Amino acid sequence: MDINIIRKEDTFKSLLEILFLQYQHYNNLITFIDNNYETNDPLTMAKDFAEELSLYETDIEEIFSTNIFDINSETLDINFNTDLLNNISKALIEIKALIPHDFEKLCALYIKFLGTTGIPNITKHSHDQGIDFVGIVERKVHSRLFSSKSNINKIYLIGQAKHYDTDKVKSNEIRELAGSIYLLKTKGFALKNDPYPNISIKSFTPIYVYFITSYYFSEAAKRLCIHSDIMPIDRILLALTFGLNSEYHDVTGHFCPYTLKNALS
């Protein structure tokens, strides 16, 4: 991925967070850009932002089957589904306020949302070996194609959680996670005993690797994630996941911080 695209995405995510938190104050993207981004041409920037928003809205609709805003391509007026935006903004605020240990639990809930079987494991800090959570997605495979002792029917979702307020994830942290996954496969641990006795990962067991942060990624970190197939998850995607997930709503359909806290405990 071109570095300019990564920089563009970084700017987009920063503006998107402001829009999610302050959507009540704006009904036009030109005004929004003029107030929140230094540029000599707010109209061009607003058009560019509107284009990216439309693409993002398409992804949101595909994943969550809902529409959170509509943009008039000519006037750049924007209409919000206020109930949904309110849920997203509340979830975003709640995620930012979590303590690090609870953020790790939130990351486990996130990979549970992705389809893991049961509740994912949270690794104890005393022997996490660079890994914070492990979940398993079980899939059906044709029994005639694989040995009965094969682990090929399981996909492991493994990763690290970093709760940052203003620090972006750096490339060395991505490299450390990649090394931790390699050591997990080879059982190359610093501890005397295996800290993951219930995890059966072989040389070619399918693994999806996630790096989840409550802030954002540096350009180098994002590029390394792309080149190594590590999924970078930032707080915008977390806010969408938990804000739009009815599992964390009250009976009126509003995001409920207490429901999320109960899930974390």
Image (cartoon, grey):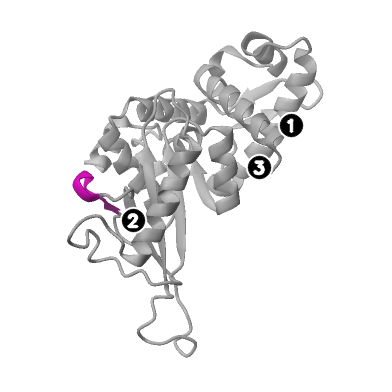
261 or 255, nearer to the observer: 261
> Residue 58 shows which numbered tag?
3
Q: Is residue 179 above or below residue 244?
A: below
Task: Name the mark nearer the viewer: 2 or 3.
Answer: 2
Q: Which residue is mark 2?
A: 134
Q: Is residue 26 visible?
A: yes
At label 3, the amino acid type is Thr
Q: Give, as a three-letter code, the residue at label 1.
A: Glu
- Mark 2: give few (<14), some (14-19) or many (20+) Cα within 10 Å: many
Could you tell me the amino acid type at mark 2?
Answer: Val
Task: Using the image, determine if residue 113 lies above or below residue 250.
Answer: below
Image side of residue 43 versus residue 221, left or right: right
Circle 1 SS class = helix
Q: Is residue 122 magenta?
A: yes
Q: Label 3 to label 1, Cα distance in Å?
A: 11 Å
Q: Earlier in the sequence, mark 2 or mark 1?
A: 1
Whether tag 2 and tag 3 are in contact, CB under 8 A, the answer is no
Question: Which numbered disc, 2 or 3, marks the residue that appears first in the sequence?
Answer: 3
Instruction: Out of 122 and 245, give the one closest to the viewer.
Output: 122
Q: Secondary structure at mark 2?
A: strand
Q: Position of residue 34 (x, y in %)?
A: 69, 10
Query: Which quadrant would the C terminus be assigned to in this image?
Result: top left
Pick whichever, 239 or 198, lies toward us.
198
> Residue 146 location in percent, x, y?
45, 85
Which mark identifies residue 51? 1
Q: Quadrant of residue 205?
A: bottom left
